[in-house]
Image (cartoon, rainbow, N blue to C red):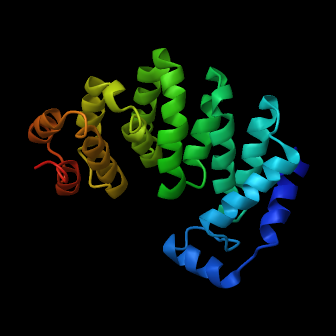
Amino acid sequence: MENYVEVLYEAALKHRNDEEAVRLSNYMRNQFSFIGLRAPLMKAVFKQHVKNYGLPQKEELHQVITSLWQLEEREMQISGLYLLDLMKKQFTEDDLPLLEYIITTKPWWDTIDHIAKKHAGYYLELFPHARQHIVDKWIASGNIWLIRSSILFQLGYKEKTDVAMLEDIISRTCHTKEFFINKAIGWALREYAKQNPEKVIEITNTYPLSNLSRREALKHIG
Protein backbone atom coordinates (compact mmCIF):
# COMPACT_ATOMS: atom_id res chain seq x y z
CA MET A 1 0.00 0.00 0.00
CA GLU A 2 3.00 2.33 -0.10
CA ASN A 3 2.01 3.12 -3.68
CA TYR A 4 -1.47 4.14 -2.50
CA VAL A 5 0.09 6.71 -0.17
CA GLU A 6 2.68 7.83 -2.70
CA VAL A 7 0.04 8.51 -5.35
CA LEU A 8 -2.02 10.57 -2.89
CA TYR A 9 1.10 12.46 -1.82
CA GLU A 10 2.05 13.24 -5.41
CA ALA A 11 -1.48 14.46 -6.13
CA ALA A 12 -1.27 16.85 -3.19
CA LEU A 13 2.18 18.08 -4.21
CA LYS A 14 0.80 19.18 -7.59
CA HIS A 15 -1.04 21.92 -5.71
CA ARG A 16 1.95 23.13 -3.67
CA ASN A 17 1.57 26.73 -2.58
CA ASP A 18 4.64 27.98 -0.73
CA GLU A 19 3.03 31.20 0.46
CA GLU A 20 0.04 29.37 1.86
CA ALA A 21 2.35 26.76 3.40
CA VAL A 22 4.11 29.47 5.41
CA ARG A 23 0.80 30.94 6.52
CA LEU A 24 -0.54 27.58 7.63
CA SER A 25 2.67 26.73 9.46
CA ASN A 26 2.59 30.06 11.30
CA TYR A 27 -1.05 29.46 12.25
CA MET A 28 -0.01 26.14 13.75
CA ARG A 29 2.82 27.80 15.70
CA ASN A 30 5.36 26.23 13.36
CA GLN A 31 4.67 22.78 14.76
CA PHE A 32 4.53 21.28 11.24
CA SER A 33 5.45 21.97 7.65
CA PHE A 34 2.75 22.17 4.98
CA ILE A 35 2.33 21.69 1.26
CA GLY A 36 0.04 24.71 1.31
CA LEU A 37 -3.41 23.23 0.73
CA ARG A 38 -6.33 24.69 2.59
CA ALA A 39 -8.89 22.20 3.87
CA PRO A 40 -11.38 22.42 0.97
CA LEU A 41 -8.66 21.76 -1.60
CA MET A 42 -7.12 18.92 0.42
CA LYS A 43 -10.56 17.33 0.77
CA ALA A 44 -11.08 17.63 -2.98
CA VAL A 45 -7.71 16.01 -3.70
CA PHE A 46 -8.49 13.20 -1.27
CA LYS A 47 -11.98 12.59 -2.68
CA GLN A 48 -10.61 12.38 -6.21
CA HIS A 49 -7.97 9.93 -5.01
CA VAL A 50 -10.62 7.69 -3.45
CA LYS A 51 -12.72 7.96 -6.59
CA ASN A 52 -9.76 6.85 -8.69
CA TYR A 53 -8.25 4.19 -6.41
CA GLY A 54 -10.93 3.27 -3.89
CA LEU A 55 -10.28 2.57 -0.24
CA PRO A 56 -7.56 0.28 1.07
CA GLN A 57 -8.52 -3.11 2.41
CA LYS A 58 -9.19 -3.19 6.15
CA GLU A 59 -6.08 -5.27 6.78
CA GLU A 60 -4.02 -2.57 5.06
CA LEU A 61 -5.43 0.33 7.07
CA HIS A 62 -2.78 0.39 9.80
CA GLN A 63 0.04 0.45 7.26
CA VAL A 64 -1.57 3.22 5.21
CA ILE A 65 -2.27 5.41 8.24
CA THR A 66 1.22 4.86 9.63
CA SER A 67 2.74 5.78 6.26
CA LEU A 68 0.69 8.98 6.13
CA TRP A 69 1.78 9.89 9.65
CA GLN A 70 5.41 9.41 8.73
CA LEU A 71 5.25 12.03 5.97
CA GLU A 72 6.46 15.47 6.94
CA GLU A 73 3.66 17.66 5.64
CA ARG A 74 0.61 18.09 7.85
CA GLU A 75 -1.87 17.69 5.02
CA MET A 76 -0.99 14.01 4.89
CA GLN A 77 -2.01 13.40 8.48
CA ILE A 78 -5.25 15.27 7.78
CA SER A 79 -5.76 12.94 4.80
CA GLY A 80 -5.40 10.05 7.23
CA LEU A 81 -8.25 11.48 9.26
CA TYR A 82 -10.41 11.68 6.14
CA LEU A 83 -9.59 8.05 5.44
CA LEU A 84 -10.56 6.96 8.95
CA ASP A 85 -13.82 8.89 8.60
CA LEU A 86 -14.68 6.59 5.69
CA MET A 87 -13.42 3.36 7.27
CA LYS A 88 -14.28 3.68 10.96
CA LYS A 89 -17.36 1.50 10.56
CA GLN A 90 -14.91 -1.36 10.04
CA PHE A 91 -13.22 -0.79 13.41
CA THR A 92 -12.55 -3.85 15.52
CA GLU A 93 -11.27 -3.89 19.10
CA ASP A 94 -7.81 -4.54 17.68
CA ASP A 95 -7.76 -0.99 16.29
CA LEU A 96 -7.12 0.61 19.69
CA PRO A 97 -3.33 0.71 19.13
CA LEU A 98 -3.93 2.56 15.86
CA LEU A 99 -6.00 5.19 17.63
CA GLU A 100 -3.41 5.56 20.35
CA TYR A 101 -0.69 5.88 17.73
CA ILE A 102 -2.37 8.76 15.89
CA ILE A 103 -3.23 10.48 19.17
CA THR A 104 0.33 10.36 20.50
CA THR A 105 2.29 10.77 17.25
CA LYS A 106 2.65 14.32 15.88
CA PRO A 107 -0.15 15.47 18.18
CA TRP A 108 -1.74 18.90 18.11
CA TRP A 109 -5.28 20.16 18.50
CA ASP A 110 -6.02 20.00 14.77
CA THR A 111 -5.82 16.22 14.69
CA ILE A 112 -6.66 15.39 18.30
CA ASP A 113 -10.04 17.10 18.37
CA HIS A 114 -11.13 15.29 15.22
CA ILE A 115 -9.81 11.94 16.45
CA ALA A 116 -11.33 12.32 19.91
CA LYS A 117 -14.86 12.99 18.68
CA LYS A 118 -15.02 11.19 15.33
CA HIS A 119 -12.78 8.17 15.90
CA ALA A 120 -12.16 7.52 19.60
CA GLY A 121 -15.75 8.48 20.32
CA TYR A 122 -17.02 6.09 17.67
CA TYR A 123 -14.72 3.30 18.86
CA LEU A 124 -15.75 3.67 22.50
CA GLU A 125 -19.40 3.67 21.48
CA LEU A 126 -18.86 0.45 19.52
CA PHE A 127 -17.10 -1.24 22.44
CA PRO A 128 -18.62 0.22 25.62
CA HIS A 129 -17.38 -2.69 27.74
CA ALA A 130 -13.81 -1.45 27.14
CA ARG A 131 -14.60 2.21 27.79
CA GLN A 132 -13.70 2.47 31.47
CA HIS A 133 -10.46 0.54 31.10
CA ILE A 134 -9.33 2.70 28.16
CA VAL A 135 -10.26 5.97 29.87
CA ASP A 136 -8.42 4.91 33.03
CA LYS A 137 -5.40 3.96 30.94
CA TRP A 138 -5.36 7.25 29.05
CA ILE A 139 -5.71 9.37 32.18
CA ALA A 140 -2.98 7.41 33.96
CA SER A 141 -0.64 7.79 30.98
CA GLY A 142 0.14 11.41 31.80
CA ASN A 143 0.05 12.16 28.07
CA ILE A 144 -1.92 15.40 27.66
CA TRP A 145 -3.34 14.32 24.29
CA LEU A 146 -4.63 10.99 25.57
CA ILE A 147 -6.09 12.83 28.56
CA ARG A 148 -7.68 15.43 26.28
CA SER A 149 -9.14 12.61 24.18
CA SER A 150 -10.62 10.96 27.26
CA ILE A 151 -12.35 14.23 28.13
CA LEU A 152 -13.64 14.93 24.62
CA PHE A 153 -14.64 11.53 23.24
CA GLN A 154 -18.30 11.99 24.25
CA LEU A 155 -18.70 15.33 22.43
CA GLY A 156 -21.08 13.82 19.87
CA TYR A 157 -23.01 11.61 22.29
CA LYS A 158 -25.62 14.24 23.26
CA GLU A 159 -28.37 12.52 25.29
CA LYS A 160 -26.33 9.31 25.31
CA THR A 161 -23.55 10.98 27.30
CA ASP A 162 -22.46 8.96 30.32
CA VAL A 163 -22.54 11.93 32.65
CA ALA A 164 -21.26 9.95 35.63
CA MET A 165 -18.18 9.01 33.62
CA LEU A 166 -17.76 12.57 32.35
CA GLU A 167 -17.93 13.92 35.89
CA ASP A 168 -15.45 11.31 37.10
CA ILE A 169 -13.03 12.17 34.30
CA ILE A 170 -13.27 15.86 35.12
CA SER A 171 -12.75 15.24 38.82
CA ARG A 172 -9.53 13.37 37.99
CA THR A 173 -8.14 15.77 35.41
CA CYS A 174 -9.05 19.26 36.62
CA HIS A 175 -6.09 19.67 38.98
CA THR A 176 -3.74 21.02 36.34
CA LYS A 177 -2.54 24.22 34.71
CA GLU A 178 -2.28 22.52 31.31
CA PHE A 179 -4.16 24.67 28.80
CA PHE A 180 -5.21 21.86 26.47
CA ILE A 181 -6.71 19.84 29.32
CA ASN A 182 -8.50 22.76 30.94
CA LYS A 183 -9.83 23.92 27.58
CA ALA A 184 -11.13 20.39 26.90
CA ILE A 185 -12.92 20.26 30.26
CA GLY A 186 -14.69 23.52 29.49
CA TRP A 187 -15.59 22.39 25.99
CA ALA A 188 -16.97 19.02 27.15
CA LEU A 189 -19.11 20.71 29.81
CA ARG A 190 -20.29 23.44 27.44
CA GLU A 191 -21.42 20.76 25.00
CA TYR A 192 -23.19 18.74 27.70
CA ALA A 193 -24.89 21.90 28.94
CA LYS A 194 -27.05 21.68 25.81
CA GLN A 195 -28.56 18.54 27.35
CA ASN A 196 -28.46 19.33 31.06
CA PRO A 197 -27.36 22.84 32.10
CA GLU A 198 -28.28 22.23 35.74
CA LYS A 199 -25.84 19.32 35.95
CA VAL A 200 -23.08 21.40 34.40
CA ILE A 201 -23.65 24.14 36.97
CA GLU A 202 -23.49 21.50 39.69
CA ILE A 203 -20.18 20.15 38.38
CA THR A 204 -18.65 23.62 38.13
CA ASN A 205 -19.66 24.27 41.74
CA THR A 206 -18.32 20.95 42.99
CA TYR A 207 -14.81 20.73 41.55
CA PRO A 208 -11.86 23.16 41.56
CA LEU A 209 -12.01 23.95 37.87
CA SER A 210 -9.64 26.45 36.34
CA ASN A 211 -11.04 29.83 35.40
CA LEU A 212 -10.70 28.79 31.76
CA SER A 213 -12.70 25.58 32.25
CA ARG A 214 -15.39 27.31 34.26
CA ARG A 215 -15.75 30.18 31.81
CA GLU A 216 -16.05 27.81 28.84
CA ALA A 217 -18.46 25.50 30.65
CA LEU A 218 -20.89 28.28 31.56
CA LYS A 219 -20.50 30.25 28.34
CA HIS A 220 -24.03 29.69 27.05
CA ILE A 221 -25.85 29.17 30.32
CA GLY A 222 -27.98 32.16 31.27
Q: On the rendered structure, is 198 left or right of 76? A: left
Which residue does the image show at 11% across and 35% down from the upper left? 202
Q: Position of residue 166 (x, y in %)?
A: 30, 31
Query: Is residue 108 visible to us here?
Result: no
Residue 73 occupies quadrant? bottom right
**165 or 147: which is nearer to us?**
165
Q: Position of residue 103 (x, y in %)?
A: 55, 45
Q: Residue furthest right?
A: 3
Q: On the rendered structure, is 96 left or right of 14? A: left
Which residue does the image show at 47% across and 40% down from the upper left? 117
Q: Quadrant of the N terminus?
A: top right
**8 or 140: which is nearer to us?**
8
Q: Position of residue 177 (x, y in %)?
A: 27, 55
Q: On the rendered structure, is 135 left or right of 53? A: left
Q: On the rendered structure, is 124 left or right of 139? A: right
Q: Position of residue 221 (x, y in %)?
A: 14, 48
Q: Residue furthest top?
A: 129
**97 or 153: which is nearer to us?**
153
Residue 133 occupies quadrant? top left
